[in-house]
Image (cartoon, rainbow, N blue to C red):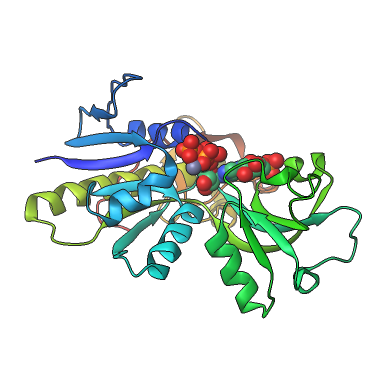
Amino acid sequence: MRLKLAIQKSGRLSEASLELLRACGVRLRLHEARLLAHAQGMALDVLRVRDDDIPGLVMDGVVDLGLVGENVLEEATLARQASGEAHALERLRALDFGRCRLSLAYRGEDAHADVRSLEGRRVATSYPQLTRRYLQQQGVQAQVVNLAGSVEVAPRAGLADAICDLVSTGVTLEANGLREGEVIFRSQATLLARGGEWNDAQRELLGRLLRRIDGVQRARESKYIMLHAPTDRLGAVRALLPGSEHPTVLPLAGDPGRVALHAVSKEAVFWDTMEGLEALGCTSILVLPIEKMLTGGEA
Ligand code: PRT
Ligand code: ZN
């Protein structure tokens, strides 16, 4: 018994998707020509396709799992709702990559343009469902023009008055003389599961994959801190360390006034925290990345 997982073949999510799988102990030998890769290390088959196909493959139960941007998922779900097709699936985890926003954008020279000024006008987008839903919510009647690519050139080409497109840094909008307006949707990569029956073996395997994903995500957020602290300042030192509950405190050979403290911090450790530790008399302060983490039931 193996589970099938669909990921983006080549694009912005591919590298991070493969890296997450690698971190979960899923080893893949990819062949450019082959759609399906048989993984080692976990009973998974990985299907590599265009991201737009992933929600449909999961909703139709062709694959068990999919890894895709919430923007693509939401657009596909709305399209299926509109046509009365089945769209059952479950969102299992939001993943920490592929972040972007879907925003309206106006010509730079239309300094006061906003969604209201689109009444009776034309908006170009690759996300017609999400765009229409937002316009409806705002009570604005505008024509939505569906473009699969190069949406950002539509205003200059005279095809539309505004666009609704994905933005991450904003550089593309700026390069095309556009100004970002209302953010209508925020997105990141997400792990989806098909609806329908899951047998015990499938559920067990999915549970194992999710625990590994959680372990990877927790490890990425956490840091391992090591330092030497004056014994009499230990309380103050511990109070400074974010999200570290049970530090290990060890004696330092030949130095009764100082101890070594090791702790896992569940938050990022910033320079001001390190400077605070230094000010308390701590020395040899090290902050290390953690590669993998299982807490054995502890939150
Ligand atoms: O071939 P396939 O259909 O699989 O890929 P695709 O071309 O449809 O998608 P791809 O690889 O471009 O993006 C995949 C997913 O990455 C998207 O669905 C989002 O969930 C996520 N993502 C994150 C982004 C961006 N950031 C992003 N900046 N997708 C697209 N962009 C584009 C945007 O459309 C615009 O053209 O990047 C440009 C804007 O970027 P900035 O940095 O200039 O603002
Ligand atoms: Zn796509």
Q: Which corner quadrant of the figure contains ligand 1? A: top right
Q: Which is more toward the observer, 129 or 14?
A: 129
- Left or right for 286, reference 203: right
Res 271 visible? no
Q: Is residue 285 above or below residue 121?
A: above
**Residue at image point 79% right, 49% down:** 158
Residue 40 lies, with reference to residue 121, above or below; the image says above
- Please identify the quadrant where the N terminus is shown: top left
Q: Quadrant of residue 143?
A: bottom right
Asked if residue 159 lies left or right of residue 93, the reply is: right
| Left or right side of 281 for 58 | left
The picture places residue 67, in percent across and down from the top left corner, at 38, 46
Report the number of numbered marks: 0
Q: Position of residue 106 (x, y in %)?
A: 80, 57
Q: Residue at x 8, y 56 (%)?
A: 199
**At which x and y percent is residue 231?**
53, 47
127 or 173: nearer the viewer: 127
Give coordinates of residue 287: x percent, y percent.
55, 36
* Among the 4 quarters of the image, the one containing residue 40: top left
Report whether residue 3 is seen: yes
Give the residue at x 44% y 65%: 78
Q: Nearer the viewer, residue 272 or 211?
A: 211
What residue is rendered at 51% in x and 55% in y?
Answer: 71
Looking at the image, is 219 positioned above or below residue 103? above
The C terminus sits in image quarter = bottom left
| Left-right relation of 222 to 216 | right
